[in-house]
Amino acid sequence: MRIRIRPVETSFYDLFAESAEHLVKGSNLLAQILDPDADRKVIGEQMREAEHAADETTHRIVKRVNSTFVTPFDREDIYRLASNLDDVMDYMEECVDLIGLYEVEEFPQQFADQIDVLQRACQLTADAMPRLRTMKDLEEYWIEINRLENQGDRSYRRILADLFSGSYKSLQVLKLKDVVESLEAAIDALESVANTVEQIAVKES
């Protein structure tokens, strides 16, 4: 009697790549906030749409896990990676939303550097996701993400120092601190994505 082996469901790779592409779009929208002529309301609406699309992709991943017999790697790792990617988008949407709600017009020095770090990390993540299929050439990705996260931490500390230097009014400090912390959380979440990818690669090697 021939034993039939169920094929491994491979659509997860495409879904993770799709999820990471949402992050690239979100980070680019966030960067547009720096343009003094930008329509903040339009950007906010576009970000909410992007966040909703990212949520839909996350739901599809979870639904696929729950209905798939053989997954390409551990179910818990799939859940964790999907959640990490979703967190990045949530924090970016929060950052844009706070800028609009607080009517922030002036940003601290280094804020643009933080957004640049975020954009580069999002693009690296989008480039890396398709390589989950082979689990090859991923080490450089998580090493670079870690380097960028450290760079982001340094910028974050400089921003806080600037905020508390006495150059800003108390209310401005409170508003900007919330915005900057959301941005920092998005960068930290990207490191969590890279750490999860590293753990998966080690298990699968």
Image (spheres, rainbow, N blue to C red):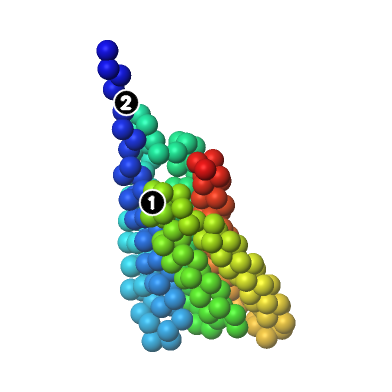
Q: Secondary structure at mark 1?
A: helix
In the picture, measured across the screen, residue 91 lies left or right of residue 7, that is right
Residue 36 in the image: above or below residue 14: below
Residue 203 in the image: above or below residue 113: above
What's the mark number on residue 16?
1
Residue at 50% across / 66% down in the picture?
121
Give the labeled residue for mark 2. 5
Q: Secondary structure at mark 2?
A: loop
Image x and y of residue 81, in percent: 47, 47
Residue 176 in the image: above or below residue 141: below
Amino acid found under the numbered disc labelled 1:
Phe
Q: Answer whether residue 105 is visible to the viewer in this image.
A: yes
Image x and y of residue 145, in percent: 55, 63
Q: Quadrant of the N terminus?
A: top left
What's the mark number on residue 168?
none
Amino acid found under the numbered disc labelled 2:
Ile
Q: Earlier in the sequence, mark 2 or mark 1?
A: 2
Seen from the viewer's position, the closer of residues 52 and 58 is 58
Q: Answer whether residue 89 is visible to the viewer in this image.
A: no
Label 2 to label 1, Cα distance in Å?
A: 25 Å
- Mark 2, other Cα within 10 Å: few <14 / some 14–19 / many ≥20: few
Residue at 71% across / 83% down in the picture?
166
Residue at 41% across / 61% down in the picture?
126
Seen from the viewer's position, the closer of residues 89 and 200 is 200
